[in-house]
Amino acid sequence: MKFDKFSCPVCGASLVLEGRTCKCGNGHCFDVARENYVNLNISQKSGEKIGDNKQMIEARRAFLQLGHYQPLADKLADLVGQYCPMGGTILDLGCGYGYYICHIAARHGDSYRYLAADISKEAIKIGGKLDTCIDFCVANSFDLPIPSGSIDVLICVFAPYATDEIYRVLKEDGVAVFVSPAPYHLWELKQAIYGDKAYPKSFSVDFEPLKSVQNLQLDYAFELNSHREIDSLLAMTPYLYTTPKKLLQRLEKIEKMQIRANFDITIVKKLTIRRKIL
């Protein structure tokens, strides 16, 4: 843990770790929690619960530990190796408990610096205990405590973001990797819930002023072998919270399912401004 790649959320000055406290030159201090993370979300009121709660995080962790999304984690690690220069800095924005950034760090070791940010304190508490080579922080993705032009590669998997903030924190020629659900992602789960009313859904995203440089799709199938696994997957989706209970009850009699994973992966770049020499 170093936390020196973050900036003070109050004044924007650089942070320095002294003992278990991150300090800036203007006297603002942020203690490192016992779970090895720092809370830099100053907009959060004391006692306010925002982001994924503990139940949602545990359900996501139970599902991800089954390895069903490891092909996606492998692909992200490949892309980091392709686009990030040696010694570069990687940020996992909306990292959850850190499943993907931990996988990337395990693959690439000390080749890079690793940062992870999420607005959910419950998620970051888990992540900070998983890998001390990753600097975890609680932060608002729309107001990142990260210096401008400091990130080589940013990854964002199914998480909210502000394009202007991503543009700001990326270095010139830095890249961002966005993962979103493709039209047939979790199609069989959707069919089991909605029957004939299920339909594929496409997402249209505007990444301006970032320039798209590569688009690809990751498509494969995995098996759910118990109702508990089905419940864990369901808890990761909006269906659990937006679907009438009567429709969700259709899943109660299903013990096994083959599910399609269908991801859209878009790589965008912050292009260097080429100034004409007169």
Image (cartoon, grey):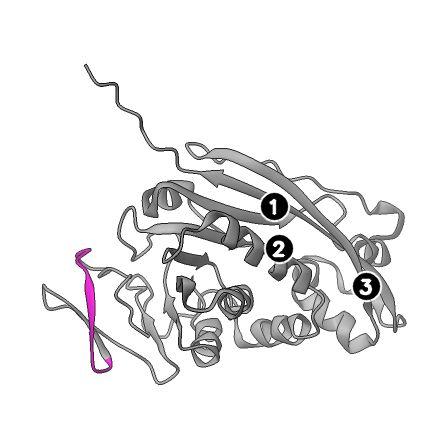
Q: CB under 8 Å between callouts 2 and 1?
A: yes
**Distance CA(mark 3)–CA(mark 2):** 37 Å
Q: Give the left or right position of residue 54, taking residue 35 as reference.
A: right
Q: Would you call the spot at circle 3 few (<14 residues within 10 Å), some (14-19), or many (20 or more)?
A: few
Task: Report the mark closest to the observer, 2 or 1.
Answer: 2
The label on residue 72 is: none
Residue sitting at x 80%, y 52%: 187
Residue sitting at x 61%, y 61%: 73
* Range of residues picked out in magenta: 11-20
Residue 110 appears at what percent x and percent y?
A: 41, 68
**Distance CA(mark 2)–CA(mark 1):** 10 Å
For mark 1, what is the residue? 265
Q: Would you call the spot at circle 1 few (<14 residues within 10 Å), some (14-19), or many (20 or more)?
A: many
Q: Give the left or right position of residue 29, taking residue 186 as reference.
A: left
Residue sitting at x 81%, y 63%: 246
The label on residue 246 is: 3
Instruction: Identify which amino acid the numbered label 3 is placed on.
Output: Lys
For mark 2, what is the residue? 75
Q: CB under 8 Å between callouts 3 and 2?
A: no
Task: Report the mark closest to the observer, 1 or 3.
Answer: 1
Earlier-in-chain disc, 2 versus 1: 2
Callout 3 secondary element: helix
Callout 2 secondary element: helix
Task: Report the mark closest to the observer, 3 or 2.
Answer: 2
Classified by dominant secondary structure, the portion drawn in magenta counts as: loop
Instruction: Identify which amino acid the numbered label 1 is placed on.
Output: Ile
